[in-house]
Each structure stands twice: as structure tokens, then as C-alpha cells.
Image (tube, rainbow, N blue to C red):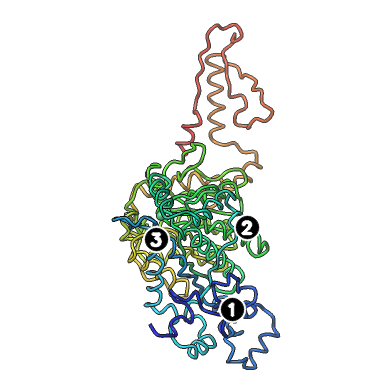
Amino acid sequence: MDAHDDVIMDGEDHRMTDGPLASNGFRDATTGESSLETTNVQSTAGTSKGEEEEEEEGGSSSQLVYPEHFRRRGLLPTGCCYDDRMKLHANADFGPNPHHPEDPSRIEHIMQTFKKAGLVFTGSDAELARIIKTEPTKYMWRIPARPATKEEICMVHHPRHYLWVEELSRKSTQELRHLSAIMDQGRDSLYVGSMTYEASLISAGGAIETCKSVVTGVVKNAFAIIRPPGHHAEYDQPMGFCLFNNVPIAAKICQADYPDLCRKILILDWDVHHGNGIQNLFYDDPNILYISLHVYRNGEFYPGKPDNPMTPDGGIEHCGAGPGLGKNVNIGWHDQGMGDGEYMAAFQKIVMPIAHEFNPDLVIISAGFDAAAGDELGACFVTPACYAHMTHMLMSLAGGKVAVCLEGGYDLEAISKSALAVAQTLMGEPPPKMEIPKISREAAKVLAKVQAYHAPYWECMRPGVVDVQELQLQDSSRLHDVVRRAQRQVLSEKHGMLPLYIQRDVLYKSFENQVLVTRGISEARRLLVIVHDPWVHLGDGL
Ligand SMILES: [Zn+2]
């Protein structure tokens, strides 16, 4: 590795001091400062005409300033967030089997793969100056990570949870080992170390800076190579290798800091596990659409059933609540073994239609690569080409504002190849030509069910053109109302049954006159109650 390797991005670059490069946003990550507000990159991404003319004059070549004439969004660079300090979160268990699938080398391996593929600049300063001037999109631009603040973390987590993670840094190795031994089992599935707190803060801070850079147009889109992952972390507890829930934290901050630019956010989670934490944090939020593709296997696949039976799991019937109804889409596969055919079909039939109807201002991909071919834990077969196509489809949303944040994925080769395909697509490489395999019959049924569950909330999930509101205005009847009326008529003619008044302030029209009784009920000594179409059956029939 030569001395200039660290100029744009490198595994060991977090000690880089502010030099002339600071004007390009390549700032010392250890300062903890966000460079977004002050860099010339941002100002050049603006639209002032005066600035453009100044640049036409030739601009100063000694300053590494993003050229004005490259400020069309498509000509902005792709960002990449990486920081070696995230490798410090490691298993405190130094026993004979210390290995854990969520290993520090995951992020390094991805970074090295990006470098080998030429996505990351590794030349000299002089060459860098020329490239920034003439071909700024040739390489990914570094987005510095920084530790997230307590206030930022607590936008989605309980302060008690923050303190619990913070306290890890004060525990002895013995205590940490003991804690890991207890928590590494069952649903908790977590290990902790003395640097877990620091690494978790940087992981969350990396997600924040990555999403902010995309929203504000510092970069066209971006990839955050971060760990520990986040999507299992709940409001008040860590879970499943996750400490802080990086993506929701970043989403909330973008909404708060840029309310005009970033009101509605799509979080697309293609990790093979259900992102229970993200779902639960936004379950009733109308402005966050959470779509997860995961193996559900009747609730048996990790994270499985929550301890509290009232908490929704990754089942497809859980569509959100209150104002957030319809804004939670669980594409929960019946089993492992899914591949390109299933994922492409899910995207073409469910994800993209709903996403377009939602019309987000920002897309964040919770990008676990454990559904990738080669990952033993996930045992699915999604190829890098399929990841490229899924990314490409998502880039058609939100004016191309796509931020990719790493979640799970444990086979180093599989995650690196998949991440590379995603990054190349973000940079503008067309996705490779791909033969789409046939979707399995069972998976097709899953998609049909998801469609049915979401038909009440999304126009695109209904067959044909059905304007429900217009139909209701026309005073037309729904088919099951007609059937019920006929049943009532038969019961009254054949058995002389009468409707019983239902004592409710508000009653849905369909249930009017639907409780029928035989004459003389007030004197009857025994009552036989027959319920037609109980709700559980109606639910199944959807
Ligand atoms: Zn996972």
C-alpha cells in the first residue's frame, strides 16, 4: 500500500488531519465534526448562477473544489462511509471459540473489495486534484463517520437503553464475558466488548452522515459500510447483534433537520431477517414506509415471536396501525431457499408499485446481505446481479436519493460481492443482464397474500381500476352486503326471524340488521347463538 492510499478512503484513514482536502469533505473523522455544513461540495451543489460563472472563469486548481458544472444530480459522486473504529466492537470472549458471525472483518472485507474493484481512489494528491476537477464521479467520495450524540440516539431509543450501552465501556473484561455468555443465547443474541459503545456510536453517526449527505445533495447517493448493525434493536433493548438502530435514527434526524426536503422516507429492508426494531419504532408512523423482505417460516425464523404477544412480528398480516396503517409491508417468505426469481417478483409486484404510490423523498436501504448466495445463516440464493437490479429499481424513486446502510450478512465473500454490485449500480453502472428464474409456487402465494392484505391501503394492490371512494359515493353495494341481505330475507321468511337493535354509538353499515332473533326471545329459557363468518375466517379468506 503506498503512502497516498489514504487520500480518499482507506481502512486506516480516520486519523487523517484537516489538510487542503478538508474542502472536499474529507475531514478528520476523529474531530467528530460534520463537514457537510461547511464544505465547498455543498455550496457547489447549490444552484446559484453567480457561482457557476465564477467557476467558468477557471476556478482555482490548487483548491480541491467540486466543479460547478458537475452539479447536475446525476453527475454528483456516490458517497461512501467507512471508519476503522467500527472494528473495535469485538467479542470479549477470548476462549477457544471466540468467533462470532458478526465479525469486525466484515466491513474491512467490503472496503477492500471496493478498493480492488477501483471504486475507491488510491493514487496521489496531484492526481486527486485532477480527478476532482475532471471526473468527480469516477470514485466514491468519502463521507466521514462520527460518533452519534446521546440526543440523536434518544430520538428513537429510551435514555435507559443508551445508558446501558454506555455503561459497557466501564465494565471489566470478566463482566463483559459474563454478559456476553448470557446474552448470546436465544432471542437476545448479542455479544458485547469494551469498545462496543464507541463502535455503536460511530455506526449510528455514520448512518446519520450518510443519509444527510444524500438528502442535502452533497452526494448523489451513498453506501455506509457500518457495524454493529441496527435493525433488530428495539426502543429499549439491544437484540440480534444490534445495539442502536442506525437507520431509524438517521431517518428521524433527516426528517427533523430537513422537513421540507425529507418528509416521507421509504426504508427497504432486504436483510434475510425481519427488522423487528424498525417495524416497531415506526408501526403507526404514516411518513415512514417500512418494507421488509425476510424469511418468516411461520414465525419460527429469527427474530421469531416477540416475548409480548401483543407486539407484532414479521407476519404479512401486520400492516401498521392507526395513521400508519398500510405503511408496514412484511414480505415474509414461507421458508429459506429463496432466490432471484422470488426477490425480483417481490420487487416488481409489491415493492415498486407501493413505493411509487407512496412517493418518498428519501430511500434508505437496510442492506443486510445474508439472503445472498453463499450465506449459510440465511440459506437463500440472491445473486449480486439481483442486488444490482433491486438497487437500480429503488434509484428510480425519490429523485435518486438512495442511502444504503449495511445490516447483517456473514459470509465475507458473499457480502463483499453483493455490496460491490450495489455500489457499482449506485455509481451509475447499468445492472448486468440477468435471466430471472421462475418464482416458486409457494412464494407466489405469499406475494398474493401480501397483495390482498394491502389492497385496502394501496390503489396499486387492487386488481384492475377500483376507485373505492367513488364506488361508495355512487351508493353501490358491496357484494357481501348483498349476500347478507339475501340471507336475512331467507331467515325472516322461513323462520320469522327479526333484526335485533344493536346498541352501539357507531355502527358500520354492513352490520346493520345483521343480528337476527326468533320471535319470543324475551321468554326463551335457552339461547342458541350461531355466528356466521367470524372475523378469523374473514381474515384467512383475504
Ligand atoms: Zn440478518
SS at mark 1?
A: loop
Q: Amino acid at mark 2?
A: Glu
Find numbered disc 3 in the image and state the secondary structure of the residue it sits on: loop
Q: Nearer the viewer, mark 2 or mark 1?
A: 2
Q: Point out which mark residue 241 bears.
A: none
- Examine the rendering and report whether any part of residue 385 can be seen: no
Q: Residue at x 63, y 62 (%)?
A: 262
Residue that badge 2 annotates: 151
Between marks 1 and 3, how big is the CA–CA gap? 31 Å
Residue under pointer 3: 369
| Farthest-out residue, left | 96
Left or right: residue 439 versus residue 500 is left
Q: Is residue 505 above or below residue 281?
A: above
Question: Mark 3: few, some, or many residues within 10 Å (few <14, many ≥20)?
Answer: many
Amino acid tagged 1:
Arg
Above or below 411: residue 132: below
Identified at 58% across, 72% down, the residue is: 31
Rendering coords of residue 92 (x, y %): 39, 56
Q: Report x, y in % for residue 69.
A: 60, 85
First reached walking from the N terminus: tag 1 or tag 3: 1
The answer to whether residue 425 is visible is yes
Q: Amino acid at mark 3?
A: Phe
Q: Quadrant of ligand 1?
A: bottom left
Give me the C-alpha separation between circle 2 and circle 1.
34 Å
Residue 486 found in image quarter: top right
User: Which residue is at the front of the view, 302 or 72?
Assistant: 302
Foreground of the two, 532 or 252: 252
Tell me the number on the disc at residue 72: 1
> In this rendering, would 33 be left or right of 242?
right
